Amino acid sequence: MQDENASVVLVDDEEMVLTSLSSFLTLETDYEIHTFTSAKQALEFVKTSLVDIVISDYLMPEMDGITFLGHVRDVKPEVPRIILTGYADKENAIKAINEVGLYQYIEKPWENDDLLIVLRNGLEKQQLMKRLQEKIDQINKAYADLQGLHKEIVKTFV
Amino acid sequence: MEENQKKDIRKLQAEIEKLTDELHQKNLQLAESEKYVTLGQLTAGIAHEINTPLGALRSNNDLFTRCFAKIRKILFQEDVPESIRQNKELIKLFNSIDQLNKVNNNAGERIIDIVNSVRKYARQEENKHSLVNINELIDSTLPILQHELKHRIQVHRDYGKVDEILGFPHHLNQVFVNILVNAVQAIEGTGDIYIKTYQQNDDVVVEIRDTGKGISKENIQKIFTMGFTTKKIGAGMGLGLALVKQIIESHHGVIEVESEVGKGTLFRIHLPISSGCETKKLPFFDIYIFFMALFYYKLTVTVLQIYQGRLIERPYRDD
Protein backbone atom coordinates (compact mmCIF):
# COMPACT_ATOMS: atom_id res chain seq x y z
CA MET A 1 0.00 0.00 0.00
CA GLN A 2 1.14 3.48 -0.72
CA ASP A 3 0.88 4.55 2.93
CA GLU A 4 4.10 2.74 3.80
CA ASN A 5 6.08 5.91 4.36
CA ALA A 6 3.20 8.09 5.44
CA SER A 7 4.05 11.24 7.37
CA VAL A 8 2.38 11.17 10.80
CA VAL A 9 2.21 14.19 13.13
CA LEU A 10 1.74 13.53 16.88
CA VAL A 11 0.91 16.35 19.29
CA ASP A 12 0.69 16.00 23.10
CA ASP A 13 1.91 18.23 25.91
CA GLU A 14 3.11 15.12 27.81
CA GLU A 15 6.51 13.91 26.63
CA MET A 16 5.92 10.35 27.85
CA VAL A 17 2.82 9.95 25.71
CA LEU A 18 4.74 11.07 22.62
CA THR A 19 7.54 8.62 23.41
CA SER A 20 5.11 5.73 23.86
CA LEU A 21 3.18 6.51 20.69
CA SER A 22 6.24 7.13 18.50
CA SER A 23 8.09 4.05 19.81
CA PHE A 24 5.11 1.89 19.03
CA LEU A 25 4.58 3.31 15.55
CA THR A 26 8.30 3.16 14.75
CA LEU A 27 8.36 -0.49 15.78
CA GLU A 28 5.25 -1.65 13.96
CA THR A 29 5.12 0.58 10.88
CA ASP A 30 7.30 2.36 8.33
CA TYR A 31 5.61 5.70 8.92
CA GLU A 32 7.63 8.87 9.28
CA ILE A 33 6.82 10.09 12.79
CA HIS A 34 6.98 13.78 13.80
CA THR A 35 6.31 14.60 17.47
CA PHE A 36 5.47 17.97 19.03
CA THR A 37 4.70 19.10 22.57
CA SER A 38 3.63 22.50 21.26
CA ALA A 39 0.54 22.84 19.08
CA LYS A 40 1.92 26.07 17.57
CA GLN A 41 5.12 24.37 16.39
CA ALA A 42 3.08 21.45 15.08
CA LEU A 43 0.90 23.85 13.08
CA GLU A 44 3.97 25.50 11.51
CA PHE A 45 5.20 22.06 10.49
CA VAL A 46 1.84 21.12 8.99
CA LYS A 47 1.74 24.35 6.99
CA THR A 48 5.19 23.85 5.49
CA SER A 49 5.55 20.08 5.13
CA LEU A 50 4.00 17.07 3.50
CA VAL A 51 1.67 15.54 6.09
CA ASP A 52 -0.61 12.52 5.74
CA ILE A 53 -2.34 12.32 9.12
CA VAL A 54 -2.47 14.30 12.39
CA ILE A 55 -3.15 12.98 15.91
CA SER A 56 -3.55 15.43 18.77
CA ASP A 57 -4.31 15.33 22.49
CA TYR A 58 -7.37 17.31 23.59
CA LEU A 59 -6.36 18.98 26.83
CA MET A 60 -3.22 21.02 26.25
CA PRO A 61 -2.10 24.22 27.99
CA GLU A 62 -1.24 26.40 24.99
CA MET A 63 -4.07 25.54 22.61
CA ASP A 64 -6.62 22.76 23.00
CA GLY A 65 -6.65 19.89 20.52
CA ILE A 66 -9.94 20.84 18.87
CA THR A 67 -8.76 24.40 18.14
CA PHE A 68 -5.46 23.08 16.83
CA LEU A 69 -7.13 20.53 14.54
CA GLY A 70 -9.50 23.25 13.33
CA HIS A 71 -6.44 25.22 12.15
CA VAL A 72 -5.07 22.09 10.54
CA ARG A 73 -8.30 21.73 8.60
CA ASP A 74 -8.08 25.33 7.40
CA VAL A 75 -4.56 24.76 6.15
CA LYS A 76 -4.80 21.19 4.83
CA PRO A 77 -8.44 20.02 4.67
CA GLU A 78 -7.61 16.70 3.00
CA VAL A 79 -5.51 15.47 5.96
CA PRO A 80 -7.42 13.16 8.37
CA ARG A 81 -7.49 14.56 11.92
CA ILE A 82 -7.69 12.38 15.04
CA ILE A 83 -8.18 13.49 18.64
CA LEU A 84 -6.93 11.73 21.78
CA THR A 85 -9.32 12.32 24.61
CA GLY A 86 -9.43 11.25 28.23
CA TYR A 87 -12.46 9.58 29.77
CA ALA A 88 -13.60 12.66 31.57
CA ASP A 89 -13.58 15.03 28.65
CA LYS A 90 -14.99 12.57 26.12
CA GLU A 91 -18.39 14.25 25.99
CA ASN A 92 -17.04 17.75 25.41
CA ALA A 93 -14.68 16.35 22.82
CA ILE A 94 -17.48 14.61 20.92
CA LYS A 95 -19.53 17.81 20.79
CA ALA A 96 -16.57 19.76 19.46
CA ILE A 97 -15.62 16.97 17.05
CA ASN A 98 -18.62 17.64 14.87
CA GLU A 99 -17.75 21.32 14.60
CA VAL A 100 -14.24 20.61 13.39
CA GLY A 101 -15.04 17.55 11.28
CA LEU A 102 -12.65 14.99 12.68
CA TYR A 103 -12.03 11.56 11.26
CA GLN A 104 -12.06 9.73 14.60
CA TYR A 105 -11.47 10.09 18.31
CA ILE A 106 -9.35 7.72 20.40
CA GLU A 107 -9.91 7.35 24.13
CA LYS A 108 -7.06 7.53 26.60
CA PRO A 109 -5.66 5.15 27.74
CA TRP A 110 -5.49 3.82 24.23
CA GLU A 111 -5.09 0.27 22.96
CA ASN A 112 -2.11 -0.02 20.64
CA ASP A 113 -3.92 -2.33 18.23
CA ASP A 114 -6.91 0.02 17.98
CA LEU A 115 -4.58 2.95 17.33
CA LEU A 116 -2.97 1.06 14.47
CA ILE A 117 -6.33 0.22 12.88
CA VAL A 118 -7.57 3.81 13.16
CA LEU A 119 -4.36 5.14 11.60
CA ARG A 120 -4.43 2.63 8.75
CA ASN A 121 -8.08 3.36 8.01
CA GLY A 122 -7.46 7.09 8.16
CA LEU A 123 -4.53 6.86 5.75
CA GLU A 124 -6.51 4.57 3.45
CA LYS A 125 -9.35 7.08 3.41
CA GLN A 126 -6.92 9.84 2.59
CA GLN A 127 -5.46 7.78 -0.26
CA LEU A 128 -8.93 7.04 -1.60
CA MET A 129 -9.94 10.72 -1.42
CA LYS A 130 -6.76 11.67 -3.28
CA ARG A 131 -7.36 9.12 -6.03
CA LEU A 132 -11.01 10.16 -6.22
CA GLN A 133 -10.02 13.79 -6.67
CA GLU A 134 -7.55 12.76 -9.39
CA LYS A 135 -10.24 10.79 -11.19
CA ILE A 136 -12.70 13.68 -10.93
CA ASP A 137 -10.08 16.00 -12.40
CA GLN A 138 -9.45 13.48 -15.21
CA ILE A 139 -13.15 13.19 -15.95
CA ASN A 140 -13.57 16.96 -16.02
CA LYS A 141 -10.68 17.30 -18.43
CA ALA A 142 -11.98 14.48 -20.64
CA TYR A 143 -15.42 16.06 -20.59
CA ALA A 144 -13.99 19.41 -21.63
CA ASP A 145 -12.06 17.70 -24.43
CA LEU A 146 -15.22 15.89 -25.50
CA GLN A 147 -17.16 19.16 -25.61
CA GLY A 148 -14.44 20.73 -27.68
CA LEU A 149 -14.46 17.81 -30.08
CA HIS A 150 -18.24 17.94 -30.27
CA LYS A 151 -18.15 21.63 -31.28
CA GLU A 152 -15.62 20.83 -34.04
CA ILE A 153 -17.88 18.10 -35.42
CA VAL A 154 -20.93 20.37 -35.41
CA LYS A 155 -18.95 23.16 -37.12
CA THR A 156 -17.89 20.75 -39.87
CA PHE A 157 -21.49 19.84 -40.66
CA VAL A 158 -23.10 23.25 -40.35
CA MET B 1 -55.22 21.62 86.90
CA GLU B 2 -51.55 21.31 87.62
CA GLU B 3 -51.57 17.66 86.59
CA ASN B 4 -52.93 18.55 83.15
CA GLN B 5 -50.46 21.37 82.75
CA LYS B 6 -47.60 19.06 83.69
CA LYS B 7 -48.87 16.52 81.17
CA ASP B 8 -49.01 19.14 78.41
CA ILE B 9 -45.55 20.38 79.25
CA ARG B 10 -44.20 16.85 79.15
CA LYS B 11 -45.92 16.33 75.80
CA LEU B 12 -44.38 19.48 74.35
CA GLN B 13 -40.98 18.48 75.70
CA ALA B 14 -41.26 15.14 73.95
CA GLU B 15 -42.26 16.92 70.69
CA ILE B 16 -39.29 19.27 70.93
CA GLU B 17 -36.92 16.38 71.58
CA LYS B 18 -38.27 14.53 68.56
CA LEU B 19 -37.92 17.56 66.29
CA THR B 20 -34.42 18.29 67.57
CA ASP B 21 -33.43 14.72 66.82
CA GLU B 22 -34.79 15.01 63.28
CA LEU B 23 -32.94 18.27 62.76
CA HIS B 24 -29.77 16.67 64.02
CA GLN B 25 -30.22 13.76 61.61
CA LYS B 26 -30.78 16.11 58.69
CA ASN B 27 -27.63 18.05 59.59
CA LEU B 28 -25.60 14.88 59.71
CA GLN B 29 -27.09 13.81 56.40
CA LEU B 30 -26.12 17.10 54.84
CA ALA B 31 -22.59 16.95 56.22
CA GLU B 32 -22.22 13.38 55.01
CA SER B 33 -23.38 14.19 51.50
CA GLU B 34 -21.14 17.24 51.32
CA LYS B 35 -18.24 15.07 52.34
CA TYR B 36 -19.08 12.70 49.52
CA VAL B 37 -19.24 15.51 46.98
CA THR B 38 -15.73 16.73 47.83
CA LEU B 39 -14.49 13.17 47.99
CA GLY B 40 -16.06 12.51 44.62
CA GLN B 41 -14.39 15.51 43.05
CA LEU B 42 -11.07 14.55 44.59
CA THR B 43 -11.17 10.99 43.33
CA ALA B 44 -12.28 12.12 39.88
CA GLY B 45 -9.31 14.48 39.80
CA ILE B 46 -6.88 11.79 40.92
CA ALA B 47 -8.27 9.31 38.42
CA HIS B 48 -7.83 11.83 35.65
CA GLU B 49 -4.23 12.53 36.66
CA ILE B 50 -3.38 8.84 36.81
CA ASN B 51 -4.65 8.31 33.28
CA THR B 52 -1.71 9.78 31.42
CA PRO B 53 1.14 7.85 33.04
CA LEU B 54 -1.13 4.82 33.02
CA GLY B 55 -1.59 5.12 29.28
CA ALA B 56 2.16 5.36 28.77
CA LEU B 57 2.83 2.36 31.03
CA ARG B 58 0.27 0.17 29.36
CA SER B 59 1.42 1.11 25.89
CA ASN B 60 5.07 0.52 26.80
CA ASN B 61 4.28 -2.86 28.34
CA ASP B 62 2.59 -3.85 25.12
CA LEU B 63 5.64 -2.57 23.29
CA PHE B 64 7.96 -4.74 25.39
CA THR B 65 5.88 -7.77 24.50
CA ARG B 66 6.13 -6.95 20.80
CA CYS B 67 9.86 -6.15 20.94
CA PHE B 68 10.70 -9.38 22.72
CA ALA B 69 8.60 -11.34 20.27
CA LYS B 70 10.66 -9.87 17.44
CA ILE B 71 13.98 -10.47 19.23
CA ARG B 72 12.96 -14.04 19.90
CA LYS B 73 12.10 -14.55 16.25
CA ILE B 74 15.51 -13.26 15.15
CA LEU B 75 17.43 -15.33 17.69
CA PHE B 76 15.63 -18.55 17.00
CA GLN B 77 15.59 -18.56 13.24
CA GLU B 78 17.30 -21.25 11.23
CA ASP B 79 20.56 -19.57 10.25
CA VAL B 80 21.45 -18.70 13.84
CA PRO B 81 24.20 -20.96 15.30
CA GLU B 82 22.92 -23.73 17.54
CA SER B 83 24.96 -22.49 20.47
CA ILE B 84 22.54 -19.58 20.64
CA ARG B 85 19.43 -21.14 19.21
CA GLN B 86 19.45 -23.98 21.67
CA ASN B 87 20.94 -22.13 24.61
CA LYS B 88 18.92 -23.32 27.61
CA GLU B 89 19.59 -20.19 29.63
CA LEU B 90 18.37 -17.99 26.76
CA ILE B 91 15.19 -20.02 26.34
CA LYS B 92 14.52 -19.83 30.07
CA LEU B 93 15.07 -16.08 30.06
CA PHE B 94 12.63 -15.56 27.23
CA ASN B 95 10.00 -17.68 28.95
CA SER B 96 10.42 -15.59 32.09
CA ILE B 97 10.11 -12.39 30.08
CA ASP B 98 6.92 -13.67 28.44
CA GLN B 99 5.40 -14.45 31.82
CA LEU B 100 6.38 -11.11 33.31
CA ASN B 101 4.98 -9.23 30.35
CA LYS B 102 1.70 -11.09 30.69
CA VAL B 103 1.49 -10.22 34.39
CA ASN B 104 2.32 -6.59 33.69
CA ASN B 105 -0.34 -6.41 31.00
CA ASN B 106 -2.96 -7.86 33.36
CA ALA B 107 -1.90 -5.59 36.18
CA GLY B 108 -2.18 -2.59 33.88
CA GLU B 109 -5.65 -3.62 32.71
CA ARG B 110 -6.77 -4.04 36.29
CA ILE B 111 -5.61 -0.58 37.24
CA ILE B 112 -7.46 0.82 34.24
CA ASP B 113 -10.64 -1.01 35.30
CA ILE B 114 -10.41 0.31 38.84
CA VAL B 115 -9.74 3.87 37.71
CA ASN B 116 -12.66 3.74 35.27
CA SER B 117 -14.97 2.36 37.95
CA VAL B 118 -13.98 5.06 40.40
CA ARG B 119 -14.49 7.73 37.78
CA LYS B 120 -17.88 6.42 36.81
CA TYR B 121 -18.88 6.30 40.42
CA ALA B 122 -17.47 9.69 41.38
CA ARG B 123 -18.83 11.62 38.45
CA GLN B 124 -21.85 13.61 39.55
CA GLU B 125 -22.42 15.47 36.30
CA GLU B 126 -22.90 12.34 34.28
CA ASN B 127 -26.07 11.51 36.11
CA LYS B 128 -28.47 11.98 33.24
CA HIS B 129 -31.62 10.02 32.75
CA SER B 130 -30.50 7.32 30.33
CA LEU B 131 -30.82 3.70 29.31
CA VAL B 132 -28.94 1.44 31.71
CA ASN B 133 -27.90 -2.17 31.31
CA ILE B 134 -28.15 -3.48 34.84
CA ASN B 135 -25.63 -6.28 34.34
CA GLU B 136 -22.96 -3.85 33.18
CA LEU B 137 -23.82 -1.44 35.98
CA ILE B 138 -23.36 -4.08 38.66
CA ASP B 139 -20.09 -5.23 37.05
CA SER B 140 -18.76 -1.71 37.16
CA THR B 141 -19.22 -1.58 40.94
CA LEU B 142 -17.25 -4.76 41.61
CA PRO B 143 -13.69 -3.44 41.02
CA ILE B 144 -14.24 -0.81 43.72
CA LEU B 145 -15.14 -3.51 46.21
CA GLN B 146 -12.23 -5.73 45.22
CA HIS B 147 -10.28 -4.49 48.20
CA GLU B 148 -13.05 -5.57 50.58
CA LEU B 149 -13.66 -8.91 48.89
CA LYS B 150 -10.02 -9.95 48.47
CA HIS B 151 -9.59 -13.55 49.48
CA ARG B 152 -12.33 -14.01 51.99
CA ILE B 153 -15.49 -13.48 49.95
CA GLN B 154 -16.35 -15.18 46.68
CA VAL B 155 -18.74 -13.42 44.31
CA HIS B 156 -20.99 -15.62 42.12
CA ARG B 157 -22.70 -13.90 39.20
CA ASP B 158 -25.68 -15.31 37.37
CA TYR B 159 -26.69 -12.70 34.84
CA GLY B 160 -29.80 -13.26 32.79
CA LYS B 161 -30.71 -11.57 29.53
CA VAL B 162 -32.39 -8.36 30.59
CA ASP B 163 -33.80 -5.33 28.82
CA GLU B 164 -32.42 -1.93 29.56
CA ILE B 165 -33.98 0.23 32.26
CA LEU B 166 -34.40 3.96 32.16
CA GLY B 167 -32.77 5.62 35.12
CA PHE B 168 -29.97 7.61 36.70
CA PRO B 169 -26.81 5.53 36.44
CA HIS B 170 -25.02 7.29 39.29
CA HIS B 171 -27.88 6.71 41.71
CA LEU B 172 -28.34 3.10 40.67
CA ASN B 173 -24.60 2.63 41.13
CA GLN B 174 -24.98 3.82 44.71
CA VAL B 175 -27.79 1.34 45.31
CA PHE B 176 -25.66 -1.65 44.43
CA VAL B 177 -22.52 -0.38 46.11
CA ASN B 178 -24.48 0.16 49.33
CA ILE B 179 -26.09 -3.27 49.26
CA LEU B 180 -22.83 -5.00 48.37
CA VAL B 181 -20.93 -3.15 51.10
CA ASN B 182 -23.59 -4.22 53.60
CA ALA B 183 -23.26 -7.79 52.38
CA VAL B 184 -19.48 -7.68 52.74
CA GLN B 185 -19.75 -6.27 56.26
CA ALA B 186 -22.34 -8.87 57.24
CA ILE B 187 -19.94 -11.67 56.43
CA GLU B 188 -17.50 -12.31 59.24
CA GLY B 189 -14.54 -14.40 58.06
CA THR B 190 -15.15 -16.13 54.74
CA GLY B 191 -18.36 -16.32 52.78
CA ASP B 192 -20.13 -15.88 49.47
CA ILE B 193 -22.17 -13.29 47.67
CA TYR B 194 -24.58 -14.40 44.96
CA ILE B 195 -25.75 -11.86 42.38
CA LYS B 196 -28.56 -12.93 40.10
CA THR B 197 -30.38 -10.91 37.47
CA TYR B 198 -33.37 -11.91 35.38
CA GLN B 199 -36.37 -10.45 33.65
CA GLN B 200 -39.88 -10.99 34.90
CA ASN B 201 -42.42 -9.56 32.43
CA ASP B 202 -41.84 -5.81 32.50
CA ASP B 203 -39.39 -5.82 35.40
CA VAL B 204 -35.69 -6.43 35.72
CA VAL B 205 -35.08 -8.30 38.96
CA VAL B 206 -31.77 -8.19 40.84
CA GLU B 207 -31.16 -10.58 43.72
CA ILE B 208 -28.15 -10.09 45.98
CA ARG B 209 -27.70 -12.78 48.57
CA ASP B 210 -24.97 -13.09 51.17
CA THR B 211 -23.98 -15.81 53.62
CA GLY B 212 -23.51 -13.33 56.42
CA LYS B 213 -24.92 -13.10 59.89
CA GLY B 214 -28.41 -12.13 58.79
CA ILE B 215 -30.98 -9.74 60.21
CA SER B 216 -33.21 -10.52 63.17
CA LYS B 217 -36.99 -10.57 62.79
CA GLU B 218 -37.39 -7.54 65.01
CA ASN B 219 -34.87 -5.45 63.04
CA ILE B 220 -35.90 -6.45 59.55
CA GLN B 221 -38.88 -4.10 59.66
CA LYS B 222 -36.66 -1.17 60.48
CA ILE B 223 -33.68 -1.54 58.15
CA PHE B 224 -34.97 0.93 55.59
CA THR B 225 -35.66 3.66 58.09
CA MET B 226 -33.34 6.61 58.17
CA GLY B 227 -30.92 6.48 61.02
CA PHE B 228 -31.32 2.79 61.80
CA THR B 229 -28.02 1.03 62.27
CA THR B 230 -26.69 -1.90 64.22
CA LYS B 231 -23.16 -0.63 64.04
CA LYS B 232 -21.35 1.05 66.89
CA ILE B 233 -21.64 4.79 67.26
CA GLY B 234 -19.46 6.52 64.68
CA ALA B 235 -19.12 3.44 62.47
CA GLY B 236 -22.21 3.94 60.39
CA MET B 237 -24.88 6.52 59.82
CA GLY B 238 -27.76 4.22 59.04
CA LEU B 239 -28.38 6.15 55.84
CA GLY B 240 -27.32 3.52 53.31
CA LEU B 241 -30.46 1.45 52.99
CA ALA B 242 -32.79 4.38 53.48
CA LEU B 243 -31.10 6.01 50.51
CA VAL B 244 -31.28 2.78 48.55
CA LYS B 245 -35.03 2.54 49.12
CA GLN B 246 -35.49 6.19 48.12
CA ILE B 247 -33.58 5.70 44.89
CA ILE B 248 -35.39 2.48 43.99
CA GLU B 249 -38.75 4.08 44.60
CA SER B 250 -37.83 7.11 42.52
CA HIS B 251 -37.20 4.65 39.71
CA HIS B 252 -40.71 3.22 40.25
CA GLY B 253 -39.18 0.04 41.62
CA VAL B 254 -39.61 -2.18 44.64
CA ILE B 255 -37.09 -3.57 47.13
CA GLU B 256 -37.69 -6.66 49.22
CA VAL B 257 -35.58 -8.32 51.87
CA GLU B 258 -35.50 -11.82 53.30
CA SER B 259 -33.17 -12.87 56.03
CA GLU B 260 -32.38 -15.55 58.56
CA VAL B 261 -30.03 -15.00 61.45
CA GLY B 262 -26.88 -17.07 61.02
CA LYS B 263 -27.75 -18.02 57.44
CA GLY B 264 -27.69 -14.82 55.42
CA THR B 265 -29.69 -12.08 53.78
CA LEU B 266 -31.33 -11.68 50.38
CA PHE B 267 -32.19 -8.33 48.79
CA ARG B 268 -34.51 -8.47 45.82
CA ILE B 269 -34.93 -5.36 43.68
CA HIS B 270 -37.52 -4.92 40.95
CA LEU B 271 -36.96 -2.18 38.40
CA PRO B 272 -39.29 -1.48 35.46
CA ILE B 273 -37.78 -1.71 31.99
CA SER B 274 -37.51 1.38 29.81
CA SER B 275 -40.57 0.75 27.69
CA GLY B 276 -42.54 0.57 30.89
CA CYS B 277 -41.58 4.16 31.63
CA GLU B 278 -42.47 7.20 29.63
CA THR B 279 -39.89 7.78 26.96
CA LYS B 280 -39.40 11.11 25.34
CA LYS B 281 -40.66 9.91 21.99
CA LEU B 282 -42.01 12.56 19.65
CA PRO B 283 -45.63 12.04 18.77
CA PHE B 284 -46.02 10.51 15.31
CA PHE B 285 -42.29 9.87 15.29
CA ASP B 286 -42.61 7.05 12.74
CA ILE B 287 -44.61 9.12 10.30
CA TYR B 288 -42.01 11.86 10.57
CA ILE B 289 -39.25 9.40 9.69
CA PHE B 290 -41.25 8.15 6.73
CA PHE B 291 -41.66 11.63 5.27
CA MET B 292 -37.99 12.48 5.81
CA ALA B 293 -37.03 9.29 3.97
CA LEU B 294 -39.42 10.14 1.15
CA PHE B 295 -38.01 13.65 0.92
CA TYR B 296 -34.41 12.43 0.68
CA TYR B 297 -35.36 9.79 -1.86
CA LYS B 298 -36.97 12.44 -4.07
CA LEU B 299 -34.00 14.74 -3.63
CA THR B 300 -31.56 12.02 -4.68
CA VAL B 301 -33.64 11.12 -7.73
CA THR B 302 -33.84 14.79 -8.79
CA VAL B 303 -30.09 15.27 -8.42
CA LEU B 304 -29.44 12.16 -10.48
CA GLN B 305 -31.76 13.39 -13.21
CA ILE B 306 -29.97 16.71 -13.37
CA TYR B 307 -26.61 14.96 -13.44
CA GLN B 308 -27.79 12.58 -16.18
CA GLY B 309 -29.11 15.51 -18.20
CA ARG B 310 -25.62 17.06 -18.15
CA LEU B 311 -23.73 13.97 -19.27
CA ILE B 312 -26.08 12.98 -22.05
CA GLU B 313 -25.75 16.19 -24.08
CA ARG B 314 -28.61 17.46 -26.13
CA PRO B 315 -27.30 17.83 -29.72
CA TYR B 316 -27.66 21.61 -30.07
CA ARG B 317 -27.08 24.17 -27.41
CA ASP B 318 -27.39 27.90 -27.55
CA ASP B 319 -23.89 29.20 -27.01
Image (cartoon, rainbow, N blue to C red):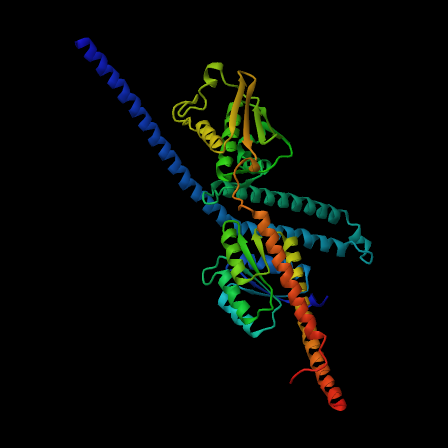
Q: Residue B96 location in percent, x, y?
A: 69, 45
**In percent of the image, x 39 and y 25: which residue is there?**
B227
In the picture, measured across the screen, residue B300 lies left or right of residue B230, that is right
Return the residue nearer the eye: B105 or B297: B297
Return the residue nearer the eye: B242 or A146: A146
In the picture, measured across the screen, residue B274 lies left or right of residue B244, that is right
Q: Residue B128 location in percent, x, y?
A: 48, 43
Toward the left, the furthest residue is: B1
Q: Residue B214 location in percent, x, y?
A: 52, 19
Q: Residue B56 location in percent, x, y?
A: 57, 53
**In percent of the image, x 65 and y 59: which residue is there?**
B297
Q: Quadrant of the N terminus of chain A?
A: bottom right
Return the residue nearer the eye: B211 or B282: B282
In the picture, measured across the screen, residue B279 lies left or right of residue B303, that is left
**In percent of the image, x 72 and y 55: which residue is there?**
B71
**In percent of the image, x 64 and y 61: which residue is there?**
B298
Q: Is residue B102 visible?
A: yes
